Amino acid sequence: MKKRYIMSPGPVEIPPTVLAAAALPIIHHRTPEYRKAFAEVNEGLKYVFQTKNDILIFPAAGTGGMESAVVNLLSPGDKIIVAAIGQFGERWAKIAEAYGVNVIKIFSEWGEGSDPKKIEEALTANKDVKAVYTTLSETSTGVENDIESIARVVSGTPAVLVVDAVSGMGAIKFKTDDWRVDVVVVGAQKGMMIPPGLAMVALSDKAKALLPASKINKYYFSYDQALKALLKDKLPDTPYTSSVSLVLQLRESIRLIKEEGLENVWARHAKVAAAVRAGIKALGLKAFAKGTPSNAVTSVWTPEGLDGDALNKKIRDDYGITMAGGQGKMKGKMFRVGHLGYTDRFDAVVAVAAVEMALNELGTKIETGKGVKAVIEELLKK
Amino acid sequence: MKKRYIMSPGPVEIPPTVLAAAALPIIHHRTPEYRKAFAEVNEGLKYVFQTKNDILIFPAAGTGGMESAVVNLLSPGDKIIVAAIGQFGERWAKIAEAYGVNVIKIFSEWGEGSDPKKIEEALTANKDVKAVYTTLSETSTGVENDIESIARVVSGTPAVLVVDAVSGMGAIKFKTDDWRVDVVVVGAQKGMMIPPGLAMVALSDKAKALLPASKINKYYFSYDQALKALLKDKLPDTPYTSSVSLVLQLRESIRLIKEEGLENVWARHAKVAAAVRAGIKALGLKAFAKGTPSNAVTSVWTPEGLDGDALNKKIRDDYGITMAGGQGKMKGKMFRVGHLGYTDRFDAVVAVAAVEMALNELGTKIETGKGVKAVIEELLKK
């Protein structure tokens, strides 16, 4: 008997009542019962996203949501800025280029956040930029971007701001309307605490104004069709079959977020992340993030002489805890601890204890107990 | 306390063990544990589809799977044949036209099946046709298409045959390889008996040979990327986050299909559908299908003078049974009874009993008990 933990930056551990919601008999997506539930989910998402904007829900991975924010807003040959701070930010450029869009790449060194001034300069030098695409919490590097400052820069221009908040929403402070973010793309299996397979997209009026001019062909991810279904009746609907069970699980996870209160959810993630960072630091390990560390995921350099994948493998296969390794060019050089979703203070204790034990067993010299001591002291702070 | 039944042609009632699989803690999609399960699902699907071809799995509604079979195989300006027999068949044309494809429409009158001769004539007259798109079981009309005969016509030409088997696979006899069907698109919430949100696509070598020439832009639904991930290692993988819980539910539903045996599954659907048809006929109601009636769904004209939506509403709201009404131009004129998934003989009894009771309560003169008598007699036949 080995107890299992998911401490990856997605999929995340799912609260018991959210799991249980998936085990109930299915209901039909075109019934008043489902559409009322779907309306409730839509309203709940507005609270989590802190927006009054319409939110579209697609059966898709987060990447599908990202693609939708390219194919609906742009035309081939359009100019955009991609402000990337890692693997997922760089994906914006790949998707846009796949559709013939002209990308100005403001790619930060991995570990850093975006510099709003560079975005401002690029916008000043390129008055024809249609949109700026960036990332809230970069999963591959564990860095949080300063979206509020980026939005301040972009909102004063004709360009729309599109934020991949897949792995931050519901975990990290994010205020769509106050900050004037136009398009927010969110995934299921991160702060929203449900299994993967749902992409959510919030759209401002400024973003909607771009839709008629878009000349990229689309069908499944068409915002026109999705908005028509969303707004046609008193109760929202979808153009194609809705992911019934995932949406009903989302209703339950939103209920949990509401019950705790969004600010408290953010504070909990901040507390757990701070405790893990304190533990890692006390062990003499080096954080990867040079920019603001994300409260969604803590990224750590693997100690010199140790294969990063070996550390992850030991923690996963011997201890039953799924963390994450490095992605892309960081493969084998990093491990990452997720703090998303159904996570609390003792997850910080377990995570750092597992790292201590694995390093010990793998022959890296560390002072045992020093990490978890720092975790506990951080958790005890008011 | 009102017992609930889903008798729609999707989403369908889900077997208890498949529901329970969704309530287990989630696992990470990049772990050996998950990838072994994913490999098992891939192998299992080959049995259900009766194919040796590679099968790609996308987090998406069935329509996303259909879109993928357009954007990967074709280029703008390419010529295709769409042999449609209802709403969903006609969707092939809408998707293709959204991507600038030139569509030869062989649209049958609703209620009829496709005429393979007409497809043959069109192929003879248009040697440059790249693909023929059609439907196995047309949900909007309750008609089964003769895919075996259509495939005999298409397989002798350079064109590939693409079949929307979303609402037939796992319920109706279908032999991908024996019949030489090149691309098969399947959905989750029908014969595969899991909640909606997964699209599966089987690809023959003849279909794969079209991929390099395709000039339609794509990213999320790229077969190149999906095949690369599927085949890169000993265990299959996906380019983006897999729909973990739906895939694990699919593993369980495939296990159930294997346990029962595919031929027995087909026979069970045939038996239940025949019983419902017998009951409907005995009540003096008129079947909508003039072509081969589908064993996935029985479509029935609403009796003269009765609003079809009123009948469905009564059965749903008063009796707790979700059937379906007419779609598109048949709205209000038809009701449809699904026989897909977790369905057995007594569902036929309940379905016809509900129709009898509702017609009685809505003032339509029918001889009470005559329908269910015919159902039972049909079920008793060897």
Image (cartoon, coloured by chain):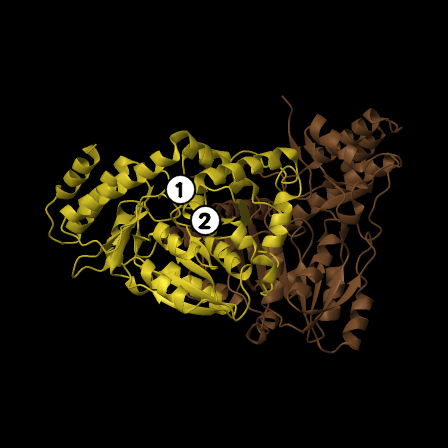
Chain colours: A yellow, B brown
Residue A73 horizontal/vertical position (percent): 54, 59
Nearest the viewer among B86 and B236 is B86
Residue B263 horizontal/vertical position (percent): 66, 50
Among the two numbered marks 1 and 2 on one chain, the one whose residue lies closer to the N terminus: 1
Nearest the viewer among B80 and A84 is A84
* Residue denoted by label 1: A170
Nearest the viewer among B153 and B303 is B303
Q: Quadrant of the C terminus of chain A?
A: top left
Please, which residue is most extreme toward the top here? B1
In the picture, measured across the screen, residue A309 lies left or right of residue B318, that is left
Residue A223 horizontal/vertical position (percent): 58, 53
Label 2 Cα crowd, 10 Å radius (few <14 / some 14-19 / many 20+): many
Chain bearing tag 2 is: A
Q: Secondary structure at mark 1?
A: loop
Rendered image quadrant of residue B132:
bottom right
Amino acid at circle 2: Val
Chain bearing tag 1 is: A
Rendered image quadrant of residue A90:
bottom left
In the picture, measured across the screen, residue B295 lies left or right of residue B44, that is right
The reply to whether discs 1 and 2 touch (Cβ–Cβ < 8 Å) is yes
Amino acid at circle 1: Gly
In the picture, measured across the screen, residue B150 lies left or right of residue A14, that is right
Q: Secondary structure at mark 2?
A: strand
Residue A347 horizontal/vertical position (percent): 28, 39
Q: Residue at x 54, y 69 (%)?
A: A76
Q: Which mark is residue B82?
A: none
Q: Quadrant of the N terminus of chain A?
A: top left
Q: Which mark is residue A186?
A: 2
Query: Is residue A195 depicted above or below B106 in this figure?
Result: above
Q: Residue at x 77, y 38 (%)?
A: B276
Please, which residue is most extreme toward the bottom here? B127
